[in-house]
Image (tube, rainbow, N blue to C red):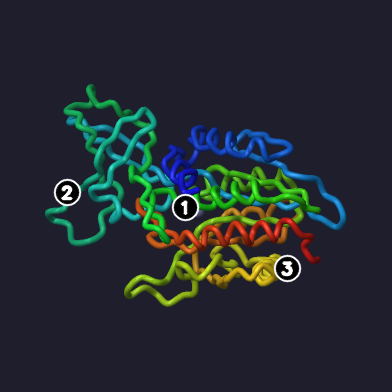
Amino acid sequence: MKTLLDKLTQTFGPSGYENEIRALIRKEIEPYVDELHIDALGNLIARKGTKRDGGKRIMISAHMDELGVMASHVTDEGFVYIAFIGGINPLTCFGSRVRFGNGTEGVIYAETKKMNKVPDVTQLFVDVGATSKENCPVKTGDIGVFVRPFLDLGDRVVSKALDDRIGCYVAIETLKAIKESPNELYFVFSVQEEVGVRGAITSAYAVDPEIGIAVDVTISADTPHCEPANPVLGKGPCVKVRDGMLIASPKVIQAMTDAAEKAAIPYQMEVLRFAGTDAGAIQFARSGVPSGCLSIACRYVHSPSEMVDWNDTLNSIRLLTVLLENPLAS
Ligand code: CO
Ligand code: ZN
């Protein structure tokens, strides 16, 4: 099972350039869905089942894009300066490697000698081994992602892009696990979340759901000297109550906690002071959609080595399956 997660994390797909990751997810889900299409922005939208017996049209969204870097200019000496695609902390970049769409790899660095504060993105450059602008295989506008292999630590897994390939994995496995449901389920693998939940805006308009549920990571609070907060690794899926973009619908919160209790799955309540997920966009579709988010606690979010708990992952699949297989109380 971890083989699929490994593949999902390692497949190229920065915001706006999701072709490869979309093709992989499409291949994986095609046998399990009734209808599938790709919209103009590149969202992969899959329907499973039709509405009956008090069921609802529910959109489940996991974003398939990942953080990236884009070449802003190349110096005469062949160094590539970059812009961030998504919220990257420059501190996590030193010595990190990136791979551009054409396969070129390089190392990110900045002159540290006189540095006494966190560097700005404009100070970072990628060294791809070129010696001049002419022989540099990377050009302005080329986009790359972090290079960091999948690491299986048993109960914990580590990789780049677990935000949100872990959500994609949970959505894929839930899609496979669901046998019967009165709900019309639209599984959306969205684009451009990391640059402002853009794919969720257009896909939610098209799907026109009655309920919206995002599946994404949240920041865990269980490392030394971290700010005290609720989500920790290994204590179960997190039911989001609020973040910077969303006050989750009490109805959706209740449905999630009911599902967890029904299936005897441990869960945690999540109150995040900042940030957001696709649910923040789905709630604004058309005349409004009650929305919530199932979160997976994650350490080192937005670094090239994000960590989640494997049992949290399996329990998230179980919780989402129970939630979606039953009618939601209204
Ligand atoms: Co993110
Ligand atoms: Zn995310």
- Examine the image and state in which quarter residue 41 appears: top right
- The amino acid pointed to by label 2 is Glu
For mark 2, does the 10 Å Cα neighbourhood hold few (<14), some (14 to 19), or many (20 or more) residues?
few
Q: Nearer the viewer, residue 78 or 235?
A: 235
Q: Which residue is mark 3?
A: 251
- From this viewpoint, is residue 308 visible? yes
**Direction from residue 10 to residue 118 in the image, left or right:** left
SS for tag 1? helix
SS for tag 2? loop
Q: Position of residue 277 (x, y in %)?
A: 56, 56
Find residue 163 and name its label: 1
Mark 1 vs mark 3: which is more N-terminal?
1
Q: Position of residue 125 (x, y in %)?
A: 25, 42
SS for tag 3? helix
Q: Residue at x 77, y 52 (%)?
A: 181
Callout in the foreground (2, 1): 1
Q: Nearer the viewer, residue 212 or 90?
A: 212
Q: Residue at x 58, y 44 (%)?
A: 190
Q: Which residue is mark 2?
A: 111
Q: Position of residue 303 (x, y in %)?
A: 36, 54
Mark 2 vs mark 1: which is more N-terminal?
2
Q: CA distance from mark 1 to mark 3?
A: 26 Å
Find residue 80 and name its label: none
Q: Nearer the viewer, residue 72 or 156?
A: 156
**Direction from residue 305 to residue 322 in the image, left or right:** right
Q: CA distance from mark 2 to mark 3?
A: 52 Å
- The amino acid pointed to by label 1 is Asp
